[in-house]
Image (cartoon, rainbow, N blue to C red):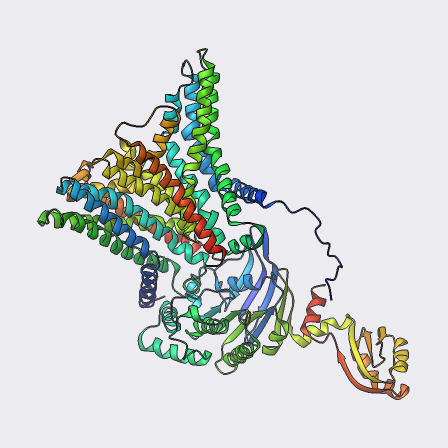
Amino acid sequence: MELGFHLVGLRALVTFSSKKLLLNRRWVIVALMAALVAVVMLYVASEGSGTIDEGSTLINTLILSFLLPIMSLIYGASMIRNEIDDRSITQVVTSPMDRRVAYIGYYLSLCVVLSVMLVIIESVGWASFFLTTSVDGEAVELLLSYALLLVIGSFVYSSLFLLLGVVFRQPIYLGLLYVFVWEALVGSLPGAIGQYTISYYIKVIGSHLIPYGNITQFSGDAGVAALVLAALAAVFLIIGAWAFREKEIP
Amino acid sequence: MGLNPIEYRPWDGQRSKHARRFLVIADSILRHNLRSKWFLAVLIVGTFLAFALNIIFTSITPHESLTPELMASQMNNGLFYIFMVILVSMVCSDLLAEDSRSNSLVLYLSRALRPEGYLLGKLTGAFITLAIFGLFPPIILAIAVTATQSGPDYLSSAKVILETVVAGIWATFFLIPIGLMVSSLTSRRTYAAVGTFMALFVLGIISGIFVQFDANWQLLDPGSVLAMSMNVIFGLGLPEQVDTWLFGAAIFAFTIPPLILVYWRILRKGVGK
Amino acid sequence: MSDPIVIAKDVSKWYGSVIGLNNFNIEVRSGITGIVGPNGAGKSTFFKLLVGTIKVNIGSMLVMGRSPWKNQSQLKDIGFCPDYEFLPMDLTGTDFLRFVGGLHGMSGQTLAKRSSEVLKLVGMTEASDRRMGGYSKGMKQRMKIAGSILHDPKLLLLDEPLSGTDPVVRKELIDMIKGLNREHGHDIIVSSHVLFEVERMTHDVALLYKGRAVASGDISEIRDLMSDHPHHIVIQGKGLVDLAKSLVDKPYTVSVQLWSDRSAITVEVSRPDELFDSMPELIAETGCQIESMRSLDDDLESLFKYLAGW
C-alpha cells in the first residue's frame, strides 16, 4: 500500500499511543520518581561537597543506571502486551496498515514519551542539586549531555522491551531478570563480560561527553559504542516488527 | 413452592472452623506457584546459584564444625538476596492484585472468610512457597556441613543449625509484608511485581548514596537490614556505627506498617471500595 | 449467481488442545448471511480467520479471492465488529472514529465528513462527544459498528452484534444492519446464537456446531433436509377425538396425543405435507371444527437441534 497511506496511519497510531501513555495513571509513578530524585539530590547537595562530580555521579546512579532501564521496562514491556490482553489492539490489527509499520508506530511513541519523562525527571533532579550549589556552563552541559544519553538509552531499551512484550506473555519478569540480574550483577563484573550490556555502551558514550563523576571510569570507543547501540536497536526493532506481523492475536 | 429436590442433594458435611480456613488459601497459593514454569525456573536457578554450589564446595572443604560466621556469610550473600527479591515479587504480586482485579475479595469476605483469615492465608501461602528457597536450602547446607565436619563438636554445630532455622524463617518472612503491600495497591499483578522490585532496589540505591554521610542510612535498605538481622541471629552483633534502636525501628517499619496497610486495603476492598 | 465472497475449504483451527474449527467448509455469497451456532461452535474463530488475526492450521480460507492471513491491505475492504469489548474507555466517540479513520488512511475534512455520516447512521451523533466509558451497552455496540463501517468496506463482519442489548436496542440494530445491506450495499456476515434474531435479518444461514458447518443455505432449503424428521403439529378445535382416531391409522402419523382438556391434539408426523394435504378430507370425514394449526418445529431452533443431533 502507498507510503502516504501508511504515514497517515503511523501519525494516528503515534498520536493515540503517546496520549495513552502520557495520560495513563502511571504518570503518578513518574511524579513520585521525580520527587524522590529531587529529594535525594537535594539532601546530597546540602550534606555533601556539592561538586559537579557528585552531581554527575548521582544522575548516573539514580537516573541513567536505574530509572532509565526500569521505566523503559515498565512502559515498553507492557505497551503492546497490555493491548493484546485487553484486546484494544483490535482496531490496529484489523486495519489495512502493515503490522510492521504499526509496530514502528508503537516504538516511536514509546521512545518519545520515555525520553520526555526521563528528561523531565533528570531536569528536576539536576535543578534540585545545582540550583542549591552552583549553576554554570559546565552544569548546563552536564544536563544536556545526560539528556542525550537518556534519549539514546530510551531508543535502545525500548526496542528491547517492546520486543519482549510482543514475544512473551509475561515479559516483565524476563525484563526484570535482564535489568537486575544481567545488567546490575553481570554488568558490574570486571573484565569483558561487563561489556555485554546496553548500559555499558551508553556509559562509554557518556564518558566521552561528560568528564565528571563515576561515568568517566568507562573507557572505550564512543563511535563503536554508538554503532553497537544503533545495531542493537535496529536488530531488536526488526525482530519485533517481524514477530508482531507473524503473531496470531486470538 | 420450595426447592425441587430432583438431583439436588443438600450438603450435609461439617463446615470447617473459620480459624482453619486460611489453610485453604495457603494451599491454593502453594499449588498455583508450583504449577508456574517461571516460578520453578527462578527457584531452580536461584537455589543452584545461591546454595547448590556452596553446599558442594563447603562440604568438601576441610572444616572443623559448622560456624555462625559461615552460615551468616551464606545467608548474606548477594545472590541469595537478589533471588529472594525476585521470588517475593513473583509470589506476592498476584496475591492481592488478582483478587482485586477479579473482585473476588468481596466474595471471599462476604461469607467464607474473615479479613484476618484472608490475610493470614495469604501470608502463610507466601511464606510456605518462599520457604522452598529461603528456609530449606540453608538448613540443608547447614546439615551437610555438619555431617562432613572433621571436628567432634556437634553440639555447637547443632546450635548453629537451630540458628539457621530461625534465620531462614526470618529471611523468608521479612520481605513478604512489602510484597503484599505493593500487591494491595494495584489490580495488575505485573505492576505489583515491578513495584515490589523497584521499591526494594530504590531503597537500596538511596541508602547507598546516603550512607557516606551517616552509617545509619544503611537501615533504609531492606537488604542491609536483613543482612544485619542475620548477624544478630547468628550472634555476631550489629556494626558499631549502627544505632540499635534505629535498627529495631527499621525492622518494625519494614514489617508492621505494610501489614497494617494491607489489612486496611482488604477491609476497603471487601466492602467494594 | 455472484462469486462467493468467502470460501473455506477443509479448514481446521485449534488452540493447543482445543479445536475451534474442524474440517469446516462454507461458501458465503453476497447479501446478509447469518452464522448461527451455540457458544463454542466456532463462530468467533471463523471471524478471526476472516480478518486474518489468526491463521488456519489446515485447509484454505479465501476472502474476496485472497487469503486473509498476513494480507493487511485486504482489510480496507473489510469492516470487523467483534463480540468482545475493545473500545478505549477514555476516548470520546469522535476521537475513536478519528483514530480508526487514521488507521485506515483517512484524515482531514474527508475523515470529519465521513465520521459525521457514520455517527448519524448509527444514531450516535449526540453522544459522540462523551467518553465511551460512560456509554450504555447499546451505545457501545453502535460505536463498534460505526468503527467497522467508517472506511466504507465491501464486507462487514459482525460477531454477535446484538449480545447484551435490550429488546428495543436489538430491534434498532437489526433494522440498521438490514439497512446497511439494502441501502448502502454492504455484504454482511452476522453471527448470533439467538436464532430468531438471525431469522429476522436474513434467510441465508450457516449452522455451526462443534467447529463444523452442519448446514448452510436458505432456511427453507435447510428445512427441507428435515423431511424425514418427525414434525410436531398442534391442532386446536372441537370434536378432535374422532380426528385423533383417524390420524392414528395414517401411514405418516408417528404418534397422536390428546390434551387433557380435549381442546387440542399434538400429532407427530414424518411427512407434514401429507398431513396438510389430507386435512380437508379428514375434517369432512370426522366433522371436527378446526380453530388453529401450528407446527412446533417450524423454526430454526428445531432445525438446528435436528441437524446437530441433539
Q: Residue at x 38, y 34 (%)?
A: B81
Q: Residue at x 78, y 74 (%)?
A: C232
Residue A211 visible (yes or no): no
Residue B267 visible (yes or no): yes
Q: Residue B110 appears at what percent x and percent y?
A: 55, 55
Q: Residue A75 appears at what percent x and percent y?
A: 34, 53
Q: Residue at x 43, y 68 (%)?
A: C133
Which residue in the rendered view is the most extreme toward the front? B245
For the residue pair C277 and C66, the one nearer the viewer reads as C277
Using the image, determine if residue B209 lies above or below residue C224. Answer: above
Q: Residue B247 appears at what percent x and percent y?
A: 32, 34
Left or right relative to A87: residue B218: left
Residue B16's quadrant in the figure? top right
Q: Residue C49 appears at what percent x and percent y?
A: 52, 62
Left or right relative to C68: residue A187: left
Which residue in the rendered view is the most extreme toward the left? A136
For the residue pair A67 and B67, the one nearer the viewer reads as B67
Residue A183's quadrant in the figure? top left
Left or right relative to C103: residue C255: right
Q: Name the image quarter holding the N terminus of chain A.
A: bottom left
Using the image, determine if residue C12 lies above or below residue C32. Answer: above
Using the image, determine if residue B173 lies above or below residue B75. Answer: below
For the residue pair C133 and B5, the one nearer the viewer reads as B5
